[in-house]
Image: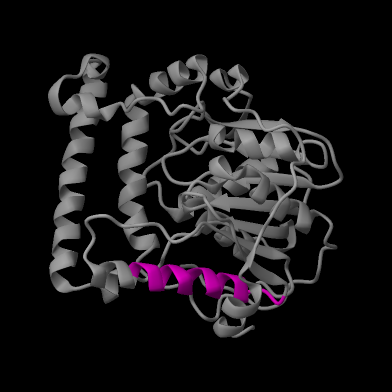
Amino acid sequence: MKSIACVALLSATVLSAPVLAEVPQQTPDTYAAAGERVTIAPGRALNLRCSGEGPRTVLLEAGGNADSATWFRVQSLLGPQARVCAYDRAGYGFSDEGPLPRNLEADVADLAALVEAAELPKPLVLVGHSLGSNIVRAYAQQHPQDVAALVLVDPPEQGAEAQLPADWKQQAEAGRAQRNAFLDACLAAAEAGTLDAGEGPLASCLRAAPPWQSAAVAAATRAYKLKPAYWRTLRSELDANTTIFASPVPETESYGDLPLVVVAAPAAEMPGVPPEVAKVLQATREQTQARLAAASRNGRRVEVPDSSHDVQLDAPEAVAEAVASVLVSEPRARTGSGSLP
């Protein structure tokens, strides 16, 4: 395994990506309806959107509280050279709700069931953003022969909480309690059928649509967020994230020679965060991404300037270029083993 210092110094290059196809500015209205609903269990289906043609299949895994629409720019760029699929996790978009809790194990099990039920050609190139990077990593550890490459888009810091000041931990715990109370209120309103007319604090349950959503897609997104299933899923996912990100990436996590690219956004400003806390968060973010790049002998980290955490929306060409670089890699034998975060 490479040393972290080596990866940080030699592999952190700036990725300048050519445009592979025209980048749409708004979500196509096709995202306002389901693509292909694939049954993965009795009474449960996940929404799958596939496009493009090519010898390899790329599967896109969204971050937390996001659906397949987050990939609309990357998917359009990659279509000319690969079969590209994105899907809605259980409880989001046009997918049915899944059993609780919605933790890493549940998400990986659903992903495995989807790959089999949809008969997606393997090995797959897996692309995961944020929380999605944890899901595709866990899938690759459990199904190593089914993965041709990994592209991890701005993986968040892991293992920061143990290093934070005690008073900040207490504030974070209080913040989580307030968040859960708010989500429970949104859920109660959704169950009562009154969320659409929510006033006061409940008006914050449904945020304004982002500018990249067309009117039709914004309306469809609002419609699924009015359902209780969405709020149960989001509440459970956020609770599970506390556990997922509590531990650092194990130094023993290994993907052998599997092509692996970590696509990193610049360090974000943290207004209102004390300097000592910001220092810990930034250091653990750098450690997380360096360890992931070092987890493969064929791994590297690339930095994308002028992007937020949502690199797939701000700089889709950079993500598409990273995927294109592993599409030309020949599958290699997997050695080593990983431990789940």
Question: Quick one: 103 or 4, which is closer to the camera?
Answer: 4
Q: Residue at the spot x=49%, y=28% of the render?
A: 93
Q: Quadrant of residue 32?
A: top right
Range covered by the magenta-colored residues: 281-297
- Quadrant where the N terminus lies? bottom right
Q: Residue at the spot x=81%, y=47% of the render?
A: 56
- The image position of residue 230, as x and y in percent, is 37, 31
Is 284 included in the stretch rendered in magenta? yes
Is 106 included in the stretch rendered in magenta? no
Q: Could one spot residue 86 in this view of the protein?
A: yes
Position of 330 relative to 198 (above/below): below
The tally of labels here is 0
- The image position of residue 198, as x and y in percent, is 20, 19
Position of 188 relative to 198 (above/below): below
- With 307 as the anchor, is 48 left or right in this view? right
- The image position of residue 217, as x and y in percent, is 51, 20
- The image position of residue 328, as x and y in percent, is 84, 57
Q: Residue at the spot x=54%, y=36% of the render?
A: 70
Q: Residue at the spot x=26%, y=29% of the render?
A: 205
Q: Could one spot residue 119 in this view of the protein?
A: no
| Colouring mode (rainbow / by chain / secondary structure / one colour) | one colour
- With 340 as the anchor, is 22 left or right in this view? right
Position of 162 relative to 23 (above/below): below
Report the magenta stretch's main SS. helix
Q: Quadrant of residue 218?
A: top left
Question: Quick one: 103 or 225, which is closer to the camera?
Answer: 225
